[in-house]
Image (tube, rainbow, N blue to C red):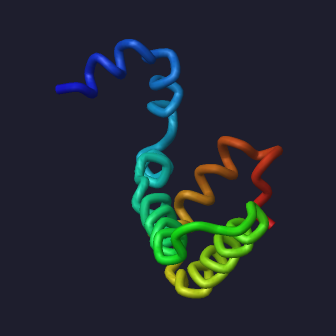
Amino acid sequence: PAIAPSWRRAWNEVIPFLDYPPEVRRLIYTTNAIEALNSKIRRAVRTRGHFPSDEAAAKLIYLALNATSVEWKRSVREWHRVKSQLAIMFEERFPMA
């Protein structure tokens, strides 16, 4: 029930997403990858507690991201179709090469 009023308030920001083909919208709308990445970072930070400096925290986050990137072997579902649609829509910014 809360989503409808939120969309109405920001309708001008919502409608551009409706112009994308279904394959692209599915990729844009999902937040699973972002949530999984945030979870990995939170877990790494939580186990350490506090840090002696900002640089130490940045290094830990870098290492967590690096380890996570090694784990992610799966490609985006239907990526070829999404990539083709993006190349059509944004030809100058998304070369197929």
Give the image quarter of residue 65: bottom right
Is residue 66 depicted above or below 23 in this figure? Answer: below
Where is residue 10 shown, x and y percent of the image?
44, 17
Where is residue 79 shown, x and y percent of the image?
54, 66
Q: Residue at x 49, y 33 (%)?
A: 17
Q: Residue at x 17, y 26 (%)?
A: 1
Instruction: Mark yes or no: residue 76 visible.
Output: no
Judge from the rendering whether residue 28 lies leftward or rightward of residue 90; answer left or right: left
Image quadrant containing the C terminus: bottom right
Is residue 70 depicted above or below 2 in this figure? Answer: below
Q: Residue at x 51, y 22 (%)?
A: 13
Query: In the orientation shown, which residue stands out farthest toward the top?
Result: 9
Judge from the rendering whether residue 1 lies leftward or rightward of residue 61; answer left or right: left
Q: Residue at x 82, y 44 (%)?
A: 92
Is residue 26 depicted above or below 20 in this figure? Answer: below
Q: Nearer the viewer, residue 1 or 26?
A: 1
